[in-house]
Amino acid sequence: MDDSAISVLIGVIICILVAALRPDVPAARNPEWYWMMKLDRDEPVAMVIGGDSRVYRGIDPTTIGERLGESVFNAGFSSAKYRREYLAYLRRLVSEDPGAIVIGLSPFSFGSREMTGFEQAVEMNRRRRLPIRMIRAFDQIPRGFAAIDPGVLLGRDPVMPSDEDYRQVFHDSGWVESDRPDAHQVDAWKTSIRKVADDYPTDPAQIDELMAAVAEWHAEGIEVFAFTTPVEEEILRFELDLFDISLESTRARFEAAGGVWLDLDSESDLRWYDVSHLDGDSAQRFSLRLAEAILASRLTAGASLE
Amino acid sequence: MIFNSIPFLVFLAVFMAVWPHVRRHDRPRVAFIALASAVFYGWWDWRFLLLIAGSGAIDFLAALQIRRDPRRRKLYLWTSVVANLGSLGFFKYLVFATDQLRWLLDLPATQWQWTDSLVLPVGISFYTFQSMSYTIDVYRGRLRPTRDPLLFFAYLSMFPQLVAGPIVRAADLLPQLRTPGGFDRDSRMDGLTLMTWGFFKKMVIADNLAPFVNEMFAASNHSQNALLWWLASVSFAIQIFADFSGYSDIARGIARWMGYRFPENFQQPYVSTSLREFWGRWHISLSTWFRDYLYIPLGGSRRSAMRNGINLLMTMTVSGLWHGANWTFIAWGGLHAGFMILERVLRLDRLQRHGAGAALGWGITMVAVLVGWVLFRAESIQQAGMIIRVMFTGNWSPADAWRSLDAHGSLGLLASAVATIIWWTGSRHPWMAWLRNRRPVRIVVVGTAIPLIVFLRGPGDVFIYFQF
């Protein structure tokens, strides 16, 4: 074997060893594959959390699972709406008895947008050329060869990449840990959400569809919880007004259908990096509150049964 | 396909597996190079192949006719030049020209809107110049034209240097391609060493500096920190050198591996003590092309001082324009011409030969080069003007400067500093050269450089010179 072949062999062996032995790099996932695998998840969970980007970026299921002692999955998708297909997807994920479904509600959860992140993932899944098992296997390989973030070499957070723009870590739990520098622009957010409200106003039929699903799940013995996705109070009031949603009436209907509404604290110790979405640390703090609220609710329900 | 991509690595692996078996036989060797190059180039867009084949056919036939029909040789030469410059002008400069005309004649923006859909074929600036040099050298009697179209296309389209140089003269490459080349253990190791060094420069140095440079030169950046802009200019200077010389080294490395030799395209340009010396060390294949086919035919330095200045200005302005259809490139060429004229007028070459004079010459040259790079990189003359003004009149707060330098930029600067120290040590200490030539040392160094490239690579950018 000549010198050049030996050199290449040495290089390749070192690369494979580093790729195999280094810790996982969740930040280096292929985003397209991530959403397809999320859709095609076949592992049963005790609790699934549904919702839009405020859920998939703002809820850490691992924190909840550790507090409750059960398996939890974040089934949030970008701009997800509670239409039949998405509701069926949430139901399919809960396979343990009795199981629980947690609904994260934003003022725009009932907007009329047709093609959301969920529908896009369905479309990508339909058009994919590789079987999902192969995608799952291949998903591991490139991450091992991901570039080492120089921020890590400089002593910074080894998990969150130091990309100068969006920082996203795609966890297996369905949570996309996120952060973004200099993105907190209230006026810009209000302008963009105004446009969304104009283009995709609230569709009352979706509220009916959700409540019917809640009643059906409750009848099956599944615990159904709901909470308002965390956002600053001023922004929440602004959005509720824009989308013409009454939290009180939504809550009343939800509870009448058999669901449990959780009141959660969106206080000042939370940080929204772009007005709408929680950063990683805040997401974990809020997730712990969600877990505590579920626990408290179960204790109350247990006490009332006695 | 670009060099730093998985498809190219697969392509190269297949090429390297087949090459040893075809190289010994003339027709298969040449056909294989042409076929592989067609796959390489057509990967971007198969239509590009029609263009290179068409312009190549014109030059191939023109060169043959120059030899067969000497009375009309000038006609055939001009046919080749017009065809090459015509296609270059159409794809690369038509949009720029129509924009200037629209502005001059105050025409509506919708006039000639169809030009916005023109796609610039990758590498057109390089292969048209390479092809023209063939016809011109035949015309001048320096080269006999080949009668083998396959050999000619293998020369013209040879994939390592097709899209970003070096511009290889037919007199250098055609004789090599007629032979199997010196394919042996040493050529393979030399080639791999060059390739590895090229990938390191491109992927670890240039690609890590790119995000910081891009952020600095974004249109919305109006920083008034002079230190920061000098840092940005130095970073871009390192980035463009590492990017372009890295590509050249990869190209030379592939050729060397095959058993052929491409000329060096860079020789430590940033040690130059004058701009004249800088142009003898930077993008040598292009600067010698302009010297041989434009500057000297215009009269070079053999005319009066005034005429020489004009020749220099014309050559450097055209050189600037070659890089891109924007006034910033023209201004960049003009700036370099201005400094070279000044050097000549003030006879600075006498000063720059001596110790302190050489240091002063180096300092002045680097300032000129760095200011020139601002022109080269800026989006517009206005932006360049703002930056250059701040570089000389802004504040020098170090805190702001270091805060803006991200982790990738720090790694890029660190990697370039380490590489410079290794090079500097190697050039001054014989024991380093001795160590470098030890077989086990070379094997281990190249082998460990590969994972360094894989795991320290930057966010990635297209090779800068691909856009030319």
Image (spheres, rainbow, N blue to C red):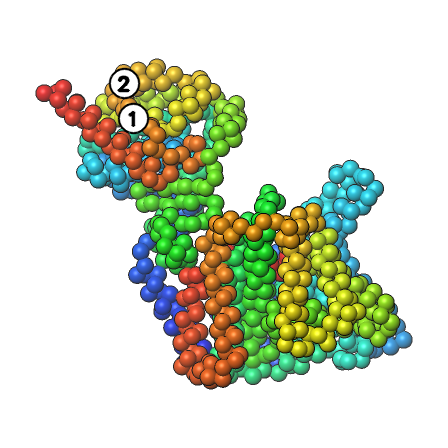
Q: Which residue is mark 1?
A: A264
**Camera-side residue: A6 or A279?**
A279
Q: Which residue is mark 2?
A: A255
Alpha-carbon neighbours of circle 2 within 10 Å: few (<14), some, or many (≥20)? some
Q: Quadrant of the N terminus of chain B?
A: bottom right
The image shows residue A246 at horizontal and vertical percentages of: 38, 16
The image shows residue A203 at horizontal and vertical percentages of: 44, 20
Q: Chain of mark 1?
A: A
The image shows residue B119 at horizontal and vertical percentages of: 67, 52
Q: Is residue B113 left or right of residue B163?
A: right
Q: Chain of mark 2?
A: A
Name above or below for residue B25 compared with residue B57. Answer: below
Q: Amino acid at mark 1?
A: Leu
Q: Residue furthest front?
A: B356
Q: Is residue B2 visible?
A: no
Residue located at (90% from left, 75% from top): B71
The image shows residue B322 at horizontal and vertical percentages of: 72, 60
Q: Quadrant of the C terminus of chain B?
A: bottom right
Question: Element under label 1?
Answer: loop
Question: What is the quadrant of residue A223 in the picture?
Answer: top left
Question: Element under label 2?
Answer: helix
Q: Residue furthest left?
A: A306
Q: Is residue B439 left or right of residue A292?
A: right
Name above or below for residue A190 compared with residue B355. Answer: above
Number of numbered discs overlaid on the protein picture:
2
Residue located at (56% from left, 80% from top): B259
Alpha-carbon neighbours of circle 1 within 10 Å: few (<14), some, or many (≥20)? some
Q: Amino acid at mark 2?
A: Glu
Name above or below for residue B341 compared with residue A25. Answer: below
